[in-house]
Amino acid sequence: MAPKYKIGQKVTVAVLKRLSARDSGLEQYAGQTGEVTNYHWVSPPMGEVFYVYTVRIGTSNKEVVLHEDEIELMRRKTSSRR
């Protein structure tokens, strides 16, 4: 399974409806945009491969590590022409 996001891609930290213990520290970043700076794959015994991503938030030097389900590809704003 290939990674869903690539280094350099702009992403948004997902706004999660239900916070688990794993997600509790992410609430402060929900809805913010960032850039994928690195990723790693994890393959637990008898399990599926999954990826975690290092994301630099905004223009700061703050980096957070997020699971694939905690980020979304940043959508470009489309301008409407009349």
Image (spheres, rainbow, N blue to C red):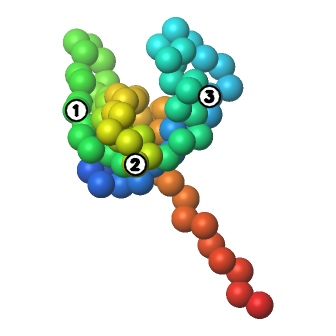
* Residue 45 in the figure: left or right of residue 80: left
Q: Single out the mark in the foreground, 2 or 3.
A: 2
Measure the alpha-carbon separation of dots 1 and 2: 23 Å
- How busy is the neighbourhood of tag 1: few (under 14 within 10 Å), some, or many (20 plus)? few
Tell me which label, 2 or 3, sits earlier in the chain: 3
**Residue 26, above or below 24:** below
Q: Single out the mark in the foreground, 1 or 2.
A: 2
- Amino acid, disc 2: Thr
- Amino acid, disc 3: Leu
- How busy is the neighbourhood of tag 3: few (under 14 within 10 Å), some, or many (20 plus)? some
The local secondary structure at tag 1 comes to strand
Q: Position of residue 12 (x, y in %)?
A: 51, 45
Q: Residue at x 50, y 54 (%)?
A: 74
The residue that label 2 is drawn on is 59
Measure the alpha-carbon separation of dots 2 and 3: 23 Å
Q: Residue furthest bottom?
A: 82
Tell me which label, 3 or 1, sits earlier in the chain: 3
The local secondary structure at tag 2 comes to loop
Q: Residue at x 52, y 9 (%)?
A: 21
Tell me which label, 1 or 2, sits earlier in the chain: 1
Along the line of sight, which residue is nearer the eye, 44 or 57? 57
Along the line of sight, which residue is nearer the eye, 63 or 49? 63
Residue 53 visible somewhere in the drawing: no
Q: Residue furthest top?
A: 21
The residue that label 3 is drawn on is 16
Quadrant position of the N terminus in the picture: top left
**Residue 34, above or below 77:** above
Residue 80 visible somewhere in the drawing: yes
**Residue 65, above or below 21:** below
The residue that label 1 is drawn on is 40
